[in-house]
Image (cartoon, rainbow, N blue to C red):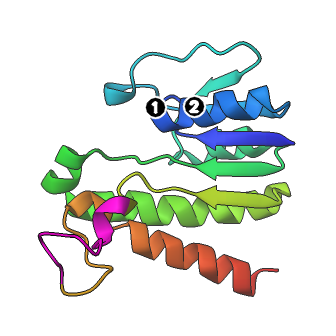
Amino acid sequence: MKCLVLGGAGFIGSNIARALLLRGHSVRVLDRATGGSGPRIEIPGLEFLTGDFLNERELADALTGMDAVIHLACPTIPQSSNDNPIYDVESNVVGTLRLLALSRESGVRKTYFLHPAAPFTESPPFSLFPRPTPRTPFVPMASPSWPSKSIFIFFTIFTE
């Protein structure tokens, strides 16, 4: 299978890319590879594209020929999500919607979504700080997680 890993230069993404390659899949990564994610990763057999998941042309090019997408891209970091929560939500939610539309146009068959801040929206049974609902984010960066998941559900139900 030909897989695109968005945000594949980070810790989780690079390990997913490596695991896919070891299982015989063809892997392409699209990542800005700036800031906290460090330099470009070097994994034999990996196709690495430097680009931004929010750039429609770069995203469309990266999707060309792919069977599956693993979406780990998060255009913001905790500090910027605190400083500018509107941009955080707009970039993550609209970016995810754009990804799904372009994936459909490109013939991508499977899309997997793992938002890096999703764990900050759940209240485990042993939590010392229970929140009013299980979907209440306790850091601004987690706010786009649930709307993005809702978009995935919408695409699954209404675009088949």
Q: Say which of 79 and 13 sits in front.
A: 13
- Residue, x 81% and y 33% (percent of image)? 23
**Residue at mark 2 to residue at mark 1: CA–CA distance:** 6 Å
Inspect this view and state whether residue 8 appears: no
Which residue reaches farthest front?
Answer: 126
Give residue 11's mark.
Answer: 1
Kindly identify which residue carries mark 2: 15
Where are the magenta residues, as a range?
119-131
- Which of the 4 quarters of the picture holds residue 6? top right
Q: Estimate the x, y position of residue 158 in percent, counting from the top left.
A: 73, 86
Quadrant the C terminus occupies: bottom right
Q: Estimate the x, y position of residue 143 in percent, counting from the top left.
A: 30, 68
Q: Estimate the x, y position of residue 70 in percent, counting from the top left.
A: 64, 49
Residue 34 in magenta? Answer: no
* Side of 41 relative to 78 (left or right): right
Looking at the magenta stretch, what is its main secondary structure?
Answer: loop
Give residue 89's mark.
Answer: none
* Side of 122 relative to 131 (left or right): right
Quadrant the N terminus occupies: top right
Inspect this view and state whether residue 110 appears: yes
User: As displayed, is residue 158 above or below residue 31?
Assistant: below
Could you say whether the residue bearing mark 1 is in a helix, strand or loop? helix
Q: Estimate the x, y position of residue 98 in percent, counting from the top left.
A: 59, 62
Tell me whether the residue at label 2 lies in contact with that at label 1, contact meaning CB atoms closer than 8 angstroms: yes
* Side of 2 relative to 89 (left or right): right
User: As displayed, is residue 77 above or below residue 113?
Assistant: above
- Residue, x 51% and y 72% (percent of image)? 149
Could you say whether the residue bearing mark 2 is in a helix, strand or loop? helix
User: As displayed, is residue 62 above or below residue 44?
Assistant: below
Residue 122 in magenta? Answer: yes
Which amino acid type is shown beneath numbered disc 1? Phe
- Residue, x 40% and y 57% (percent of image)? 91
